[in-house]
Amino acid sequence: MIVSTKELFKHAYGKYAIGAYNINNLEQTMGLFHGNLDSKAPFIIQISKGARSYTDKRMLEAMIRMADALFPDAIFAVHLDHGDEEAALDCINSGFYSSVMIDASMKPYEENIAITARIVKAAHAREISVEAELGQLGGVEEHISVSEDQVHLTDPVQAEDFVKKSGCDSLACAIGTSHGAYKFAGSQGIHFEIIAAIQKLLPGFPLVMHGSSSVPKSEVDRINAAGGAMKNAKGVDASQFLKAAKLGVTKVNIDTDGRLVWCRVHREYFKEHPENFDLRPPGKVFMAEYANYIVEKNNYLGSSGQLDAVRVFLKKT
Ligand code: G3H
Ligand code: 13P
Ligand code: ZN
């Protein structure tokens, strides 16, 4: 069942965080639904701008509609990840998305407010909620690379002003994490003092943590042992997700770790079966491994086992 992101946040706030997982293809979609149902977790499906243009956005949307029909027990929201104004308006007008992210964090502060406010106006007219971003995360997203010295952690006082002026429904904050597999040197320390300060100024307001992959060394080692050439890097310590959730982080964005699972499965499969050329055998292994990976993440997020409670909550509201 596709539900509003807002309702999922209401149920989760202060108790656990919802996993927001990016999808690009069929195998990821199947693994995602199986993993969330196996762990009885509500979840958010994210579609990025890059994913929308990888083949055709309508293919991804159609897959989600079909998965909704195939897995009637699943409860999830559909979200545009890192949208610009054009993509956000397109998603709002499509009527399919539960929420959109407008990422104008690279613009000057007043311009970020103005762009976000325009999207909020269009989205709220159709009961769609809006995630905005304030501050600059590091790492690499499609088309954008932010180096360590360009990172700006979110200023809590500015966050309060931004939320009031823009009218956004949730806020992605720069709190020490970064995007991609090649995160910064050293580990990704989450700045809990910033999250706590924002929560104090904006009690009950949902916060979003991007760049939350852990880049497990075990995955990187297996990829490299099977012919890969990945540099070592450390990501976020997943055992800290719940601490962040208690401070108002209700959505945790994870993408890179899923790509590592894909890369590891396919490299190992073809190394072990050099005679094979068929896509289905590794695809089968990938779907099962991807589901396991989702289960593991949901356990850290505390979203595991919340599905029935969310169903009851949605009926009441
Ligand atoms: O933060 C970005 C997400 O990991 C999506 O990545 O833009 O390459 O689809 P993408
Ligand atoms: P990772 O690159 O750490 O998985 O972050 C994903 C993300 O923030 C998607 O918006
Ligand atoms: Zn992100």
Image (cartoon, rainbow, N blue to C red):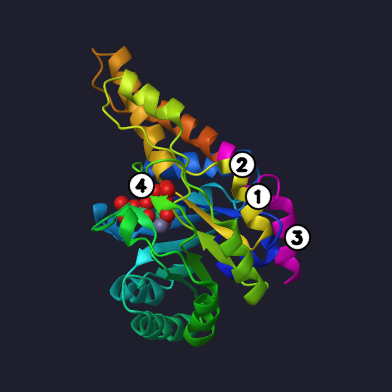
Task: Count residues near mark 4 (Cα–Cα under 10 Å), then give few for <14, some for 14-19, many for 20+.
Answer: many
- Callout 2 touching callout 1 (CB < 8 Å): yes
The residues tagged by marks 2 and 1 sit, at their Cα atoms, a distance apart of: 7 Å
Per the image, the residue denoted by label 4 is 180
**Residue type at the position of mark 4:** Gly
Ligand 3, image quadrant it occupies? bottom left
**The stretch drawn in magenta includes residue 58:** no
Q: Which mark is residue 316?
A: none
- The three-letter code of the residue at mark 3 reads Val
* Quadrant of the drawing holding the C terminus: bottom right
Q: Quadrant for residue 152, please give it.
A: bottom left
- Ligand 2 lies under 8 Å from the Cβ of mark 2: no
For the residues labelled 3 and 4, the Cα–Cα distance comes to: 36 Å
Q: Name the residue under label 3.
A: 312
Q: Position of residue 181 (x, y in %)?
A: 36, 41
Is there a contact, CB below 8 Å, between mark 3 and mark 4?
A: no
In the rendered image, the vertical position of residue 93 relative to residue 239, given as above or below: below
Amino acid carrying mark 1 in the image = Leu
Look at the picture and state if 44 lies above or below 93. Answer: above
Q: Which of pointers 1 and 3 lies earlier in the amino acid sequence?
A: 1
Other residues around mark 2 within 10 Å, as few (<14) / some (14–19) / many (≥20): few
